Image (tube, helix red, strand yellow):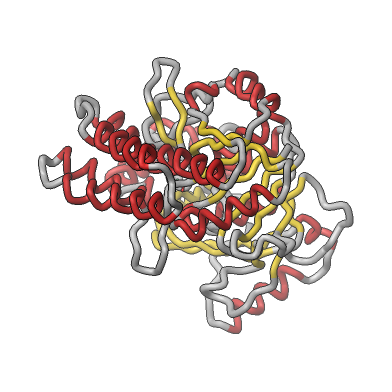
Amino acid sequence: MKVCKFGGSSVSDAKQIRKICQIIMADPARQVIVVSAPGKRFEDDIKVTDMLMRCADARLAEGDWEEPLEQVIERYRGICQELDLPAEVIKSVTQALRDVVCGSTEHIGRYQDAVKAAGEDNSARVIAGALRKMGCTARYLNPGEAGLHVTDEYGHARLLPGSLEKLGELAYVKDIVVFPGFFGYTPNGEVVTFSRGGSDITGAILAAAIGAELYENFTDVDAVFVADPRIIKAPLAVREITYREMRELSYAGFGVLHDEAIIPAVRANIPICIKNTNAPDAPGTMIVPEHQVIDSRVVGIAASGGFCTVFVSKYLMNREIGFGRRLLQIFEEEGVSYEHTPSGIDNISIIVDEASFPESTEKAVCERIEKELEPDNVNVERGMALIMIVGEGMRYAVGIASTATQCLAKAGVNLEMLN
Ligand code: ASP
């Protein structure tokens, strides 16, 4: 059995939905289908999830929510009409969207998540209808009914332990199951969404739950590329990449796959294949537990900005037992997660995500460092970028760091630290 996930651009209109139906029908193993909400059809288009968020915000602000809601309904109506689906489908989608947008706003996070999730939920209903219309025995499955239980962290749900077992029953379903991505239910029956782009996570959870032979993630690119095609012209496609390599690249900005999405699949050892809905026969990129052959080349290069360094130096730091622990404890107690900690004999840098380190937190952290650790120097630098050069086999190759640093030098870029 394979789990297939189709992203927003793969379900953005009737034409794309027909393509995905063909893809599903081309392989009987494609039985568990996870779908996103309709995404952008063209550059300046708006994703249904963003439209729904506007509705929710407008309703919360007591503004005009009818107009954006009408636009969402129109989007689904257009798709259903073009797919020639029965009138009841349009009727039930319209009703479901109205009900959720007009629902209780007593708890803001709960309300916003319920509205956001309606994009995927109705997408799944429509796509199940489209498959039936094309002659398949397909049905929509509600995540709550299937047992996808999550925490009540609105907008950042996490899977509750124990869910996989119940979800595993999906392996025995005979029909094609169309499952909305992006959200689950708390044990109390409330809808909670994963972080944005989270339909990838749903796909990986289901793949792990049923022990799928493969998790196929359909998107709008032929493969994962060695570098960002918006920066590097025509980069090479990566044919095979390990989970660890992919995780590092996703962390530093490779947007193909949600970086948390890999985790359930990794734990269950399920290979992931990134494929293009618009060219389904292209080989795509396989994300695997291990490379069969050790390749010492660089697999990918990613970069991202928005980092901040807290540099702390103290003479004889290396002899002061517990210095690092006490330093990190300050970050912990101030609620800041750290990303990296390169260090020297008498200094250590704590690299944090700038977005989680506002000036007020910086002040609190630095004051505590001064007081509790009596360093010689504490210095904060903002606006740092990180370049990640990734490849598991790199450690067996001579000269990679040298080549990379020469490139930076030639471009006149000062290298602050190397990790
Ligand atoms: N529709 C959601 C988003 O735009 C989730 C997804 O597409 O994966 O973030």
106 lies left or right of 18: left
Left of 139 or right of it: where is 37?
left
Residue 103 vs 235, above or below: the answer is above
Instruction: Say which quadrant the C terminus sits in.
Output: bottom right
242 versus 361 height, above or below: below
> Residue 306: x and y, percent?
42, 58
Could you tell me which residue is drawn at 49 percent across and 30 percent down? 158
From this view, report whether residue 13 is shown above or below residue 312: below
| Direction top: furthest residue | 188
Residue 370 in sight from this viewpoint: no
| Frontmost residue, 82 versus 412 | 82
Q: Residue at x 51, y 46 (%)?
A: 130
Q: Quadrant of the N terminus?
A: top right
Question: Which residue sits furthest bottom?
Answer: 410
Question: Above or below — where is 61 with respect to 148?
Answer: below
How many numbered markers are drawn?
0
**x, y percentage for residue 314?**
51, 47
Question: Where residue 376 sits: x, y (%)?
Answer: 45, 49
